[in-house]
Amino acid sequence: MRLAVEPWAPEYGSPTEEGGYAPQEPAVLDLEVAPKDWEPLSPGGEPVGTVYFVDGVQRIEANVVVTLDSGEARRGRCVSYGAGVVRCDGRAEVIAAEIRHEFLAPDKAAGDITTRHGTFAHYGITSDESMVFVEALHKRMAELEAEVARAAAVGPDDLLITDGPLSGRRHGVKHAVGYVKTHPTPYLPEELSQRVVAALAPGQRTPVFRLGAGRPAWYLRLPTPILHGWSGAVRCEAGDDVSGSELFSLADRVTASLPRFASEGHKDPRAPQNLYPIGGLERELKRRLGDSRLWFRALREATAA
């Protein structure tokens, strides 16, 4: 028996914490090589010169109760969210960022909320059930991420890395890649996880596989002390319109390019998976959201008037 303390700060959970989710369909494992021939792969070629990173942040500013003229009470939610793009080409620069403030509420409770610090524009939702709020905010943030990514003018030889599963968030860029830091769902058979993922050296990847009927994906290991088989492992996802040698070349380019952005434990509580450009962009976007206490106070003043 061997014990290892996860390097992530406990308040961020664990990158290997299982979420109790089982994939709807088994992974297709023979996309690049037959399962019996799976082994760690070292990418050929040089890292990509220019890499773009896309990320978003969100925050609930206040929960609102809307009492209609009929006396019926409905729930609403004031939210702030933002998205941005960092370009890394020898230096890191935020080249696009946008913040929005919205009031999520059913259509019959429509109306903007104007405060002394800004306006929360009404966005209609189908009901005031909790999951409807969650899904609406996720949708709005994904749409904003796509907008700022399209403004980045990513070149054909560049990479665009979006934080989180790709899940249709292609941003209009063919070689967009989803970057997943945690592993709540076990996509690979345990035998391949132990034989291949656990054997990855930093800078190596698994063969490409397909997430059931969904997107092609692969695991790679970032530079980090290897405390257990999943230390520093991340999952990357490509669009389903990239295939064959083009797909395998993309996997190699991503695997060769990401290790140089891996964070270190003394600088980031989610090292090494929270890449420096993503962590820096998150901090900048949260700064631009403004002070949550001021927004809360302003919303209470506006609704009390």
Image: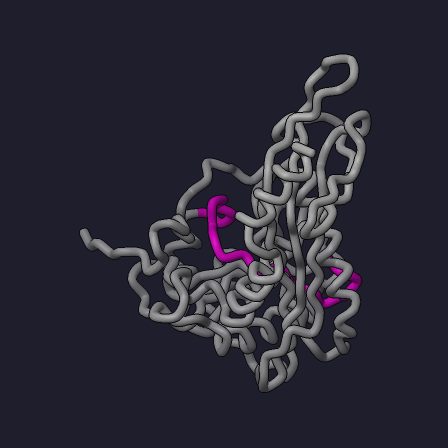
Residue 34 in sight in this render: no
Q: Say above or below: 24 vs 46.
A: above
Number of dots carrying numbers: 0
**Residue for point 56% across, 81% down:** 44
Q: Say above or below: 251 vs 60.
A: below
Q: Quadrant of residue 135?
A: top right
Q: Nearer the viewer, residue 283 or 179?
A: 283
Question: What kind of secondary structure does the magenta stretch mostly adopt?
Answer: loop
Measuring from the top left, give residue 276's x and y in whole percent.
Answer: 50, 71
Q: Is residue 179 magenta?
A: yes
In the picture, measured across the screen, residue 185 lies left or right of residue 91, that is left
In the picture, measured across the screen, residue 69 lies left or right of residue 227, that is right
**Residue for point 78% across, 13% down:** 70
Q: Is residue 75 magenta?
A: no
**Residue for point 79% across, 62% down:** 172
Q: Say above or below: 131 vs 17.
A: above
Colour mapping used in the image: one colour
In the picture, the quarter occupied by the C terminus is top right
Measuring from the top left, give residue 60's x and y in whole percent.
Answer: 59, 43
Which region shows up in magenta? 170-189
Q: Nearer the viewer, residue 267 or 194?
A: 267
Measuring from the top left, give residue 32's x and y in whole percent.
Answer: 60, 63
Q: For the view shown, which residue lies furthest in the front direction?
A: 305
In the picture, measured across the screen, residue 207 lies left or right of residue 159, that is left
Measuring from the top left, give residue 248's x and y in whole percent.
Answer: 63, 69
Residue 140 in sight in this render: yes
In the picture, measured across the screen, residue 52 lies left or right of residue 264, that is right
**Residue for point 57% across, 49% down:** 294
Q: Nearer the viewer, residue 22 or 292?
A: 292
Q: Nearer the viewer, residue 281 or 238?
A: 281
